[in-house]
Image (cartoon, grey):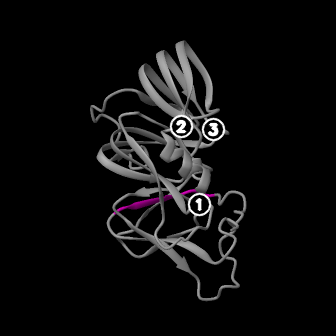
């Protein structure tokens, strides 16, 4: 996997398509297609069509039940497309027959050559708020956003924990579960609303942003 956060994108002969216009704006070169977060288009040059992308009935049902997964649009045409999301920082990943799990609200755009699905974190029950995440697999470009400059954690060095709203994306090969703090009265994570974090183990990385986001409302039965 190559990424702007790893610093190994330059001079690698990667295919075009996704380019950082600056740290907060993505330029996508068409002709081709791209799947992007609805409302993320800030400008385009050329001729383009924008269509809602539901991903099929199964994914629509998962979105409805879990609240996970950004509303997507499919863009077709020829020219230059510029994408951004609330002036958040943008980071590029190029997957080479690999997978990346992304918090749905941090997913800005990806190439349709990549397959995507919504999956639940093991042990998370039916709680809402980032415990269902979007997984993209295959070969192609992915762009994610972070609120502020993120930190890249190597989960292979030691057991790693992150607030569910602060964890932006991580390697799909990681073993991911839920950690519940012994002292349940300690609200150590504003995003989760309780003493609970995502737990990561194995060979891979976790990208964590500087903001937990708004407090999460628990799902009601």
At mark 3, the secondary structure is loop
- Residue lying at 43% horizontally and 25% vertically, measured from the top left: 33
Residue matched to label 3: 85
> Which label sits in the foreground, 3 or 2?
2
Q: Does 8 sit left or right of 68 as displayed?
A: left
Q: Earlier in the sequence, mark 3 or mark 2?
A: 2
The answer to whether mark 1 and mark 2 are in CB contact below 8 A is: no
At mark 2, the secondary structure is loop
Q: Is residue 145 visible?
A: no
Residue nearest the observer in this picture, 122 or 98? 122
Q: Is residue 174 visible?
A: yes
Residue matched to label 1: 166
Name the spot of residue 199 as percent of width and height, x first.
Answer: 48, 72
Q: Which mark is residue 186?
A: none
Residue nearest the observer in this picture, 57 or 182? 57
Residue nearest the observer in this picture, 176 or 13? 176
At mark 1, the secondary structure is loop
Residue matched to label 2: 54
Q: Give the extent of the magenta segment.
A: 204-210
Give the class, few, some or many, for how many residues have Cα within 10 Å of label 1's Cα (few <14, many ≥20): many
Name the spot of residue 114 as percent of width and height, x first.
Answer: 37, 39
Q: Does 212 sit left or right of 101 as displayed?
A: right
Give the class, few, some or many, for how many residues have Cα within 10 Å of label 3's Cα (few <14, many ≥20): many
Name the spot of residue 135 as percent of width and height, x first.
Answer: 43, 51
- Residue lying at 54% horizontally and 55% vertically, measured from the top left: 150
């Amino acid at each position: 996997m190559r990424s702007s956060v790893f610093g190994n994108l330059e001079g690698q002969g990667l295919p075009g398509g996704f380019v950082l216009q600056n740290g907060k704006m993505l330029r996508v070169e068409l002709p081709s297609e791209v799947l992007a977060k609805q409302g993320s288009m800030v400008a385009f040059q050329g001729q383009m069509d924008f269509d809602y992308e539901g991903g099929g009935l199964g994914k629509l049902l998962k979105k409805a039940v879990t609240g996970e997964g950004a509303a997507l649009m499919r863009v077709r045409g020829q020219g230059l497309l510029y994408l951004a999301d609330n002036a958040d920082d943008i980071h590029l990943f190029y997957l080479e027959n690999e997978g990346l799990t992304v918090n749905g609200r941090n997913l800005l755009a990806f190439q349709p050559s990549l397959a995507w699905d919504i999956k639940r974190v093991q042990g998370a029950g039916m709680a809402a708020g980032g415990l269902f995440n979007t997984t993209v697999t295959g070969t192609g470009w992915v762009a994610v956003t972070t609120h502020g400059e993120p930190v890249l954690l190597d989960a292979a060095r030691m057991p790693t924990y992150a607030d569910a709203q602060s964890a932006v994306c991580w390697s799909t090969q990681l073993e991911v579960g839920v950690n519940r703090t012994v002292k349940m009265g300690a609200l150590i994570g504003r995003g989760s609303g309780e003493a609970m974090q995502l737990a990561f183990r194995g060979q891979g990385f976790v990208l964590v942003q500087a903001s937990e986001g708004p407090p999460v409302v628990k799902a009601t039965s």
